[in-house]
């Protein structure tokens, strides 16, 4: 039982350069794993993802980033939409962001909460799952269709 | 001496004369024909200017090797080093190459235009265009780095810019040392205003 959500604002080109800013980056010398800590801000095009800590997962042949594992309170924001959760995993190549842990999605006037939100940045759609609850102001025109079973 | 009538005796008589003369001739070639040996160029002299060396003592291509308390091997080599002048104990050197191999298998190679080694403090300071290349594929450039010799602790004095396996990185400071959380593993730490730009390949 999930609610599909239109994410008009979040649609964007995932081949744009990704910029990661943080207070600190620690790189383990043995295996080269890299972890950004201290109000980390990941920016790509219009999208901004801020988190307490972001761990980088490299691609198979190295030299490329496969996934960004964000944790410690994640906020994904775009022009009109914002989503918050405890953790998130952003796979850059496929442009898929999986947010888990009391997810709260606000679109203009309406808000949607659940346990897991899977956003496809390329298509600009999202699927919210797990105890989905929604609040929307009757009467006002709701930016982007938000419905729930 | 009666004349010999048989051939054998004549032959022996002649041989008694010819053989010694031949031996004499052979022996003389040893001295007359052999190459002249010039004793003065037997020892190759170094053409280094002796006075300059005395006035300003220098070592060419010195090397330093040591192991830190946490088991990392440090080797430092330079093109030329000058010992510490009186009253101070920092020897200075030009075109330094240092290598730190940490027990967890990681390795960092440092290059610098000039540097100084303070034996008492056990501190190596690298200056000029310092370049640090780590086994994890990070190439960091900065202008000054200090590295302790007793323990693995490399710190940059100022901001750095680096090319990394995941893109270009800038930060205010960088330290390479043992991870305080789990000893035995080593961390390359970039601090204050770390900024990374990753360009996806596709």
Image (cartoon, coloured by chain):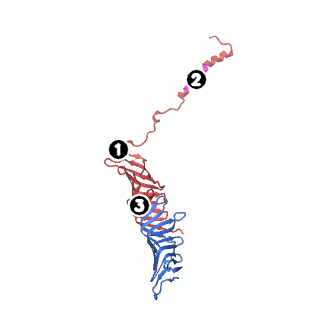
Q: Position of residue A67 (x, y in %)?
A: 51, 68
Query: Marks 2 and 3, Cα distance to the nearest angstrom?
Result: 83 Å
Nearest the camera: A124 or B44? A124
Residue that sits furthest to the left in the current view: B87
Q: What residue occupies the far bottom of the structure in this picture?
A: A139
Q: Is residue B42 above or below residue A53?
A: above
Q: Is residue B191 above or below residue B69?
A: below
Quadrant holding the C terminus of chain B: bottom right
Q: Nearer the viewer, residue A72 or A49?
A: A72
- Judge whether residue B19 is colored magenta: yes
Labels 2 and 1 touching (C-beta < 8 A): no
x and y percentages locating residue B145 in the rendered image = 39, 57
Magenta residues (range): B17-28
Residue B55 is labelled as: 1
Q: Colour of chain A?
A: blue
Q: Position of residue B156 (x, y in %)?
A: 39, 59
Ranked by sequence position, the earlier of labels 1 and 3 is 1
In the rendered view, tell whether residue B8 sits above or below residue A11: above
Q: Which residue is mark 2?
A: B23
């Amino acid at each position: 039982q999930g609610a599909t959500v239109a994410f008009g604002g979040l649609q964007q080109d995932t081949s744009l350069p990704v910029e990661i800013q943080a207070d600190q980056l620690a790189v383990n010398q043995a295996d080269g794993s890299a972890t950004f800590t201290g109000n980390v801000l990941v920016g790509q095009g219009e999208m901004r993802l801020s988190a307490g800590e972001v761990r980088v997962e490299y691609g198979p042949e190295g030299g490329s980033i496969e996934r960004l594992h964000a944790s410690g309170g994640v906020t994904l924001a775009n022009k009109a939409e914002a989503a918050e959760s405890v953790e998130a995993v952003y796979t850059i190549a496929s442009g898929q962001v999986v947010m888990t842990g009391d997810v709260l999605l606000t679109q203009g006037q309406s808000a949607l909460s659940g346990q897991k939100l899977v956003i496809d940045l390329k298509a600009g759609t999202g699927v919210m799952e797990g105890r989905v609850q929604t609040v929307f102001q009757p009467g006002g025109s709701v930016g982007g269709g938000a419905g729930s079973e | 001496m009666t004349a010999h009538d048989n051939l054998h005796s004549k032959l022996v008589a002649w041989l008694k004369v010819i053989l010694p003369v031949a031996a004499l001739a052979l022996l003389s070639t040893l001295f007359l024909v052999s190459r002249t040996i010039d004793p003065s160029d037997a020892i190759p002299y170094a053409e280094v200017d002796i006075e300059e060396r005395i006035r300003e003592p220098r070592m060419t291509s010195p090397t330093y090797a040591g192991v830190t308390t946490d088991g990392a091997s440090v080797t430092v080599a330079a093109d030329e080093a000058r010992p510490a002048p009186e009253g101070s104990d920092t020897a200075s050197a030009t075109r330094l190459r240092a290598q730190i191999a940490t027990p967890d298998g990681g390795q960092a190679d440092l290059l610098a235009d000039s540097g100084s080694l303070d034996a008492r403090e056990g501190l190596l300071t690298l200056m000029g265009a310092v370049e640090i290349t780590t086994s994890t594929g990070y190439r960091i450039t900065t202008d000054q780095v200090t590295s302790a010799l007793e323990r693995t602790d490399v710190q940059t004095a100022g901001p750095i810019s680096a090319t990394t396996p995941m893109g270009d990185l800038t930060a205010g400071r960088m330290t390479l040392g043992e991870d305080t959380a789990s000893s035995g593993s080593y961390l390359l730490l970039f601090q204050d205003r770390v900024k990374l730009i990753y360009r996806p390949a596709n």
